[in-house]
Image (spheres, rainbow, N blue to C red):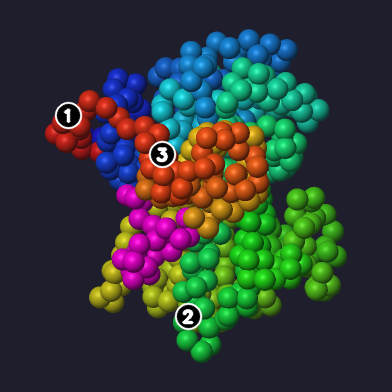
Amino acid sequence: DKSDPLEKYIFLNGLKERDPNLFYTLLGQHLPELTPLVYTPVIGQACLNYSHIYRRPEGLIISHKDKGRIREVLKAWPNRDLARIAVVTDGSRILGLGDLGVNGLPISLGKLDLYIAGAGIRPESTLPICLDLGTNTEKYLKDPLYLGLRQKRVSHREMNEFMEEFMAAMKEVFPKLLVQFEDFSTENAFFYLDAFRERYQCFNDDIQGTGSVVLAGFRNAAQIASGAGVNAPPLTGHRVLFYGSGSAGVGVAKQLMSFFTNLGMTEQEAKERIWTVDSRGLIYEGRAGVIEHKKYFARKDYSGPPMKGLKNIIEYVKPTALLGLSTQRGAFTKEIVELMTALNPRPIIFPLSNPSSLCELEYSNAVEWSAGKVVFASGSPYNAIEWQGKKYEPGQGNNMYVFPGIGLASILCEAAKVTNGMIEKAAMSLAGSLTTEEIADGLIYPRLIRIREVSARIALGVIRQAQNERVDQNASLRDLSDDDLLAYIKRKMWEPSSVESEAKGYQSKL
């Protein structure tokens, strides 16, 4: 009997080693139940405790001491010829938990489990990597069981040299590999995405994946909110306030601009529909000390004293949508939700911080405090609730809706790079994937049990976008009809074999 969530994670991880077919069969058949155990929120606990729950080698740890011989380290990977997708982290900003060093490896393992379950990527085609460049967390440096280098993080110059060697070696050793960057520190996340996106097949899930999935949910949420009577805003009239301006917050905000540009607005007009807030308050041009990645959304129409306090900022902005990427648990208080509800017939509130222990707003509170009017999506899963005799089902703006399909498409069409157009197409494909029943139930995301069907549809859209931009290198797919291409995608999605009967009779008390 495994009652503790971390014990459940350890049990499932052991099952994956003993019988991967059975593990992936169970994961696929019980995805809504098991995803929180193999990924967020429990993956956060696994990372925090990884050096203490370590059982066996599971991925590739490349340390700064390997500089000058990274190519040789990569060549030691046993499935070198089969590798098609890698999730790479440096452990410097795992979820909202801070600098975990090599303890961040489970984030790569968990993401790849979702590629396998959600898009049918073959397990032997996945490559989990953690780059050990030190850690600035004293707790780990003093921990006798810590698995990583016992040193502070290397300088920016040393990291740049290391990353250049690493990416060049990845391209040489794994020429068909897609690299997904995961949970780098905010500044480095933007820096290395900009540095490598035109040279290598790569994308950053925190910036682009989060932006894509939130764009999809926001499009559907905006349609609900704009259809809520005479006082509802038109689609072009939405005003979006971001609470949290790290790599995820700014990345989502940039992606969300395409919601407005697709309605015919200019880039400048779209940018003017977005306000951003950090720990020092509203971000505007006259405020001292605004760091580089935040400047793009700095407001030009405010020149007063620093504006602090979320309530004050909401009263000033009068947003139709409030998005949280702050990792500040409970930041969206009853007062904030009631204010958003007073301003809007159907307030859009997305508390997106992961894991759930850092979420800005609990779903039950959102429903009660808004009198059932909220259009809600969170980053971590919440159960459906009943309030005043009516069932309410939350949306989950989890990246796992889009990154499996993006990865599958990039692999199948052999994309030379992952473009902004491909990321946006993934969002539009996700937004359009709701069934008639899901729309009638007021959902803004499809139910998770349909993830493989959704991933195939996303892959279809992303491949077509890659072909339109001429970044695909698999010319054989270009002449297929949409129906034939979708059938091809589904045939290429891996399924666990030879364990169906065992899985049906497997009764694990998780």
Residue located 46% across and 74% down the image:
224
> Residue furthest toward the bottom?
230
Out of 152 and 180, give the one closest to the viewer. Answer: 180
Asked which quadrant contains residue 62, the reply is top right
- Per the image, label 3 sits on a secondary structure element best described as helix
Crowding at mark 2 (Cα within 10 Å: few <14, some 14-19, many 20+): some
- 276 over 88 or under it: above or below: below
Out of 210 and 61, give the one closest to the viewer. Answer: 210
- Residue that badge 1 annotates: 502
Q: Disc number at residue 227?
A: 2
- Of callouts 1 and 2, the N-terminal one: 2
Q: Return the x and y of residue 210 as percentages of the image width and height.
A: 56, 50
Residue located 37% across and 68% down the image:
439
Residue 499 in view of the camera: yes
Disc 1 to disc 2, how far (Cα)?
Answer: 48 Å
Give, as a three-letter code, the residue at label 2.
Answer: Gly
Tag in front: 3 or 1: 3
Crowding at mark 1 (Cα within 10 Å: few <14, some 14-19, many 20+): few
- Residue that badge 3 annotates: 488
Q: Are marks 2 and 3 in contact (CB under 8 Å)?
A: no
Q: Which residues are magenta?
A: 430-451
Query: Split into 4 quadrants, where in the image is the N terminus?
Result: top left
- Per the image, label 1 sits on a secondary structure element best described as helix
Q: Return the x and y of residue 93 as percentages of the image width and height.
A: 61, 39
